[in-house]
Image: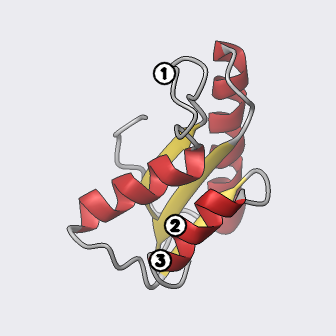
């Protein structure tokens, strides 16, 4: 997962970054899904699926970005954050989003 801090950006660019993550995932042979978590336009985390390359069925993009956003914020509360994904989250990722507060 890239760790660079990107400048404040808008919904369109954040969605484009999620699509970039999905493309990178597909290029590696993973399912082509990507996600970004941001707060006030500032990117907290971005990731693509890695379940094939990591040999881990839980390596979903949604879980990865939620975990990284929580780590960067130092809390499990993601209230005020926005989740940008390339597809509707699966039940597992949806449950994780709900547990993290409003997303």
Name the residue carrying label 3.
Answer: 99
Determine the residue located farthest toward the left in the rendered image: 74
Q: Secondary structure at mark 3?
A: helix
Q: Is residue 103 left or right of residue 18?
A: left
Q: Is residue 79 left or right of residue 60?
A: left
Disc 2 to disc 3, how far (Cα)? Answer: 5 Å
Q: Which residue is at 37% across, 60% downward? A: 69
Q: Which residue is at 67% across, 23% downward? A: 30
Name the residue carrying label 2.
Answer: 96
For the residue carrying disc 3, how many other residues have a C-alpha within 10 Å: few (<14), some (14-19), or many (20+)?
Answer: few
Disc 1 to disc 2, how far (Cα)? Answer: 20 Å
Q: Secondary structure at mark 1?
A: loop
- Tell me residue 7's x, y (percent): 43, 56
- Tell me residue 93's x, y (percent): 60, 59
Q: Is residue 47 left or right of residue 45?
A: right
In the image, residue 6 above or below residue 55:
below
In the image, residue 94 above or below residue 1:
below
The image's mark for residue 101 is none
**Front residue (pair 61, 90):** 90
- Tell me residue 53's x, y (percent): 54, 17
- Tell me residue 100's x, y (percent): 44, 76
For the residue carrying disc 2, how many other residues have a C-alpha within 10 Å: few (<14), some (14-19), or many (20+)?
Answer: some
Disc 3 to disc 1, how far (Cα)? Answer: 25 Å
**Front residue (pair 72, 20):** 72
Count of labels in the image = 3
Q: Is disc 2 in contact with disc 3, using a CB cutoff of under 8 Å?
A: yes
In the image, residue 6 above or below residue 11:
above
């Amino acid at each position: 997962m890239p760790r660079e801090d990107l400048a404040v950006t808008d919904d369109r660019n954040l969605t484009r970054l999620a699509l970039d993550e999905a493309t990178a995932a597909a290029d590696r042979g993973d399912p082509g899904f990507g996600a970004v978590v941001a707060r006030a336009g500032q990117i907290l985390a971005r990731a693509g699926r890695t379940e094939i390359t990591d040999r881990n069925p839980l390596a979903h993009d949604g879980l990865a970005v939620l975990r990284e956003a929580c780590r960067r914020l130092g809390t499990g509360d993601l209230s005020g954050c926005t989740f940008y994904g390339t597809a509707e989250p699966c039940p597992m990722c949806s449950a994780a989003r709900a547990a993290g507060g409003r997303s």
